[in-house]
Image (tube, grey):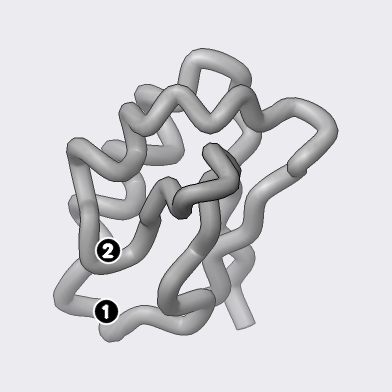
Amino acid sequence: MKVTVDYDLCESNAICVGIDPETFEIRDDDVMYIIDEHPDASRRAKIEEAVRRCPKQALAIIEE
């Protein structure tokens, strides 16, 4: 799987970071970054929750 973000939609509100800080982070420039675009399948549940709870629906999982 690949985790993606649509930066045109993302507000960097950090909900995803609170759910899965191993995958998402807010850096000093106040922009959300994906730390690991190809995470291990064991983290899927947390990433799916972050995708569901993103208020702008800026996150997505792409099956590869």
Is residue 54 depicted above or below 36 in this figure? Answer: above
The residue labelled by disc 2 is 44
Q: Residue at position x 75%, y 27% from top?
A: 9
Residue 25: mark in rendering: none
Quadrant location of the C terminus in the rendered image: bottom right
Determine whether the residue tagged by mark 1 lies in a helix, strand or loop.
Answer: helix
Q: Amino acid at mark 1?
A: Ala
The residue labelled by disc 1 is 41
Where residue 35 sits in the image (x, y, percent)? 43, 72
Q: In the figure, is residue 43 to the left or right of 53? A: left
**Nearer to us in this view, 25 or 27:** 27
Q: Amino acid at mark 2?
A: Arg
**Nearer to us in this view, 33 or 55:** 33
Where residue 7 sits in the image (x, y, percent)? 76, 41
Q: In the figure, is residue 54 to the left or right of 2? A: left
Determine whether the residue tagged by mark 2 lies in a helix, strand or loop.
Answer: helix
Q: Residue at position x 36%, y 23% from top?
A: 53
> For the residue carrying disc 1, how many other residues have a C-alpha within 10 Å: few (<14), some (14-19), or many (20+)?
few
Where residue 11 sits in the image (x, y, percent)? 61, 24
Q: Residue at position x 22%, y 56% from top?
A: 21
**Nearer to us in this view, 19 or 12:** 12
Q: CA distance from mark 1 to mark 2?
A: 5 Å
Marks 1/2 in contact by CB < 8 Å: the verdict is: yes
Q: Residue at position x 65%, y 31% from top?
A: 10
> For the residue carrying disc 2, how many other residues have a C-alpha within 10 Å: few (<14), some (14-19), or many (20+)?
some
- The residue furthest front is 28
Is residue 33 depicted above or below 13 in this figure? Answer: below
